[in-house]
Image (cartoon, grey):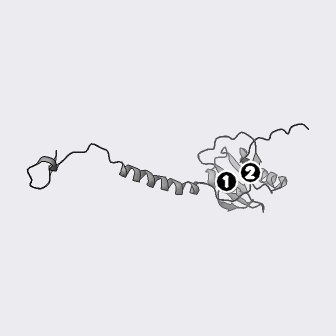
Amino acid sequence: MGARLGSGSGGDDDLTETHEINVTPFIDVVLVLLIIFMVAAPLATVDVPVDLPASTATPTPRPDKPLFLSVQADHSLSLGEAKVSKDTLGAALDAATHGDKTQRVFLRADKTVDYGALTEVMNSLRAAGYLKIGLVGLESAPAQAAPAP
């Protein structure tokens, strides 16, 4: 299926078929998808700023839709990104889990929060019927033993 341009007698004026795949549209689509995922990835994380302490424990796999309860340095609570009070914590948890009290609640606390305040939040969770509580911390390298002097 050649094409002939002009009314010449032939010879070198014939166009030949090319059997190469044009990859330019494919590269364009891949770059657009890359940009979309680069913009969407930061939006999928929780944006409540909490200064977490580091832990050397082996991390467990993250569930598809984790439920985070955050305790800020001023002892205020956030369920996901919504602020809640200690009085409305049970109702907010029931609304977020659709009444499923077997769902694990991941508790994130600022490292300046004292042990007593963290225990009060855990007691509020237990009083609301949520017994599966996971503590969240930052991963750090395991501590190495110091050499003997």
Going by the numbered disc 2, the residue's amino acid type is: Leu
Going by the numbered disc 1, the residue's amino acid type is: Leu
User: In the image, what residue occupies the spot 74% across and 53% down?
Assistant: 52
Nearest to the observer: residue 27 or residue 76: 27
Report the quarter where the N terminus lies: top left
Disc 1 element: helix
Question: Residue 147: image x %, image y %?
Answer: 86, 37
As drawn, is 103 to the left or to the right of 5?
Answer: right
User: In the image, what residue occupies the spot 62% across and 53% down?
Assistant: 96
User: In the image, what residue occupies the spot 53% across and 57% down?
Assistant: 39
Question: Residue 89: image x %, image y %?
Answer: 71, 57
Which residue carries the number 2 mark?
125
Mark 2 and mark 1: span between their CA atoms?
Answer: 9 Å
Q: Are marks 2 and 1 in contact (CB under 8 Å)?
A: yes
Question: Residue 79: image x %, image y %?
Answer: 67, 56
User: In the image, what residue occupies the spot 79% across and 41% down?
Assistant: 143
Nearest to the observer: residue 86 or residue 146: 146
